[in-house]
Image (cartoon, rainbow, N blue to C red):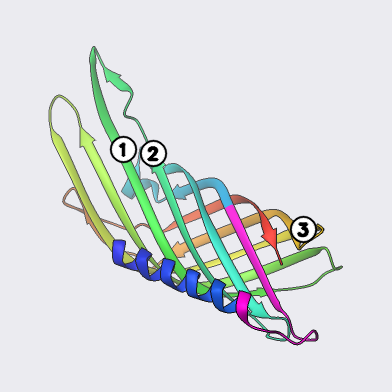
């Protein structure tokens, strides 16, 4: 998983430097968005209960030439369910799960009125999960990872600034096609996620 994130970081740095240094004709400039996401994720209850409801967050970056039909998209997300402060009698126990994900894809924006831009996204993901089932009876922790595919729909409002714009919006995202083995159980890391989006555009 760490190697995938290293590749994402390198792609992000090189694409940013290339976009910043390239002289673009005024009729076909670069269009970019850098956004943060914060929201709620629902995993399969049968596989993940009672850890199926998680808080999720991440960042994503998309870019394109203005005349291109779609943008290229790169991002990272994570979510967790933390019960580390739960108690059984007088004993504290951990019942935690963490998921981290990197993804690449394409995004299509639709210009409604010059300020609101609905979009649809498709791509591939690599997601890793770590689960801890630790109490005074047992101490089990295991990690696994899987490739998958994602799709999302959403929209952002662009508020013009002196340079670029402020982005505010929402994102509804789904992940599918994953398969893992955690704590000797075959599970899927597929999910549905609803997020608030905030960032900047150029």
**What SS does tag 2 mark?**
strand
Question: Residue at coordinates 75% horizontally, 85% vertically from top-left?
Answer: 28
Q: CA distance from mark 2 to mark 1?
A: 6 Å
Question: Residue at coordinates 45% horizontally, 67% vertically from top-left?
Answer: 103
Q: Position of residue 165 (x, y in %)?
A: 76, 60
- The answer to whether residue 185 is above or below residue 51 is below
The answer to whether the residues at label 2 and label 1 have Cβ atoms under 8 Å apart is yes
- The answer to whether residue 138 is above or below residue 64 is above
Q: CA distance from mark 3 to mark 1?
A: 36 Å
Q: Nearer the viewer, mark 2 or mark 3?
A: 3
Q: CA distance from mark 2 to mark 3?
A: 31 Å
Callout 1 crowding tier (Cα within 10 Å): few <14, some 14–19, many ≥20 = some
Q: Is residue 78 visible?
A: yes
- The answer to whether residue 173 is above or below residue 108 is above
The answer to whether the residues at label 2 and label 3 have Cβ atoms under 8 Å apart is no
Q: Quadrant of the C terminus?
A: bottom right
In the picture of the structure, the residue carrying the numbered disc 3 is 157
In the picture of the structure, the residue carrying the numbered disc 2 is 81
**Which region is colored magenta?**
20-36
- The residue at the far right in this view is 113
């Amino acid at each position: 998983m760490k190697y995938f994130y290293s590749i994402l970081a390198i792609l992000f740095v090189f694409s940013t430097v290339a976009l910043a240094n390239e002289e673009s004709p005024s009729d076909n400039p670069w269009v970019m968005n850098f956004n943060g996401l914060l929201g709620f994720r629902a995993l399969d209850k049968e596989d993940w209960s009672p850890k199926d409801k998680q808080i999720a967050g991440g960042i994503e970056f998309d870019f394109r030439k203005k005349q291109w039909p779609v943008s290229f998209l790169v991002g990272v997300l994570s979510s967790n369910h933390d019960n580390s402060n739960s108690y059984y009698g007088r004993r504290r126990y951990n019942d935690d799960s963490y998921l981290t994900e990197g993804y690449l894809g394409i995004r299509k924006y639709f210009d409604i009125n010059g300020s609101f831009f609905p979009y649809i996204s498709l791509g591939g993901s690599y997601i890793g999960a770590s689960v801890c089932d630790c109490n005074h009876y047992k101490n089990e922790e295991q990690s696994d990872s899987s490739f998958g595919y994602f799709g999302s729909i959403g929209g952002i409002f662009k508020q013009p600034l002196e340079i670029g714009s402020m982005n505010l919006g929402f994102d509804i995202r789904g992940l599918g096609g994953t398969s893992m083995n955690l704590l000797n159980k075959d599970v899927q890391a597929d999910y549905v996620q609803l997020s608030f989006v905030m960032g900047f555009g150029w």
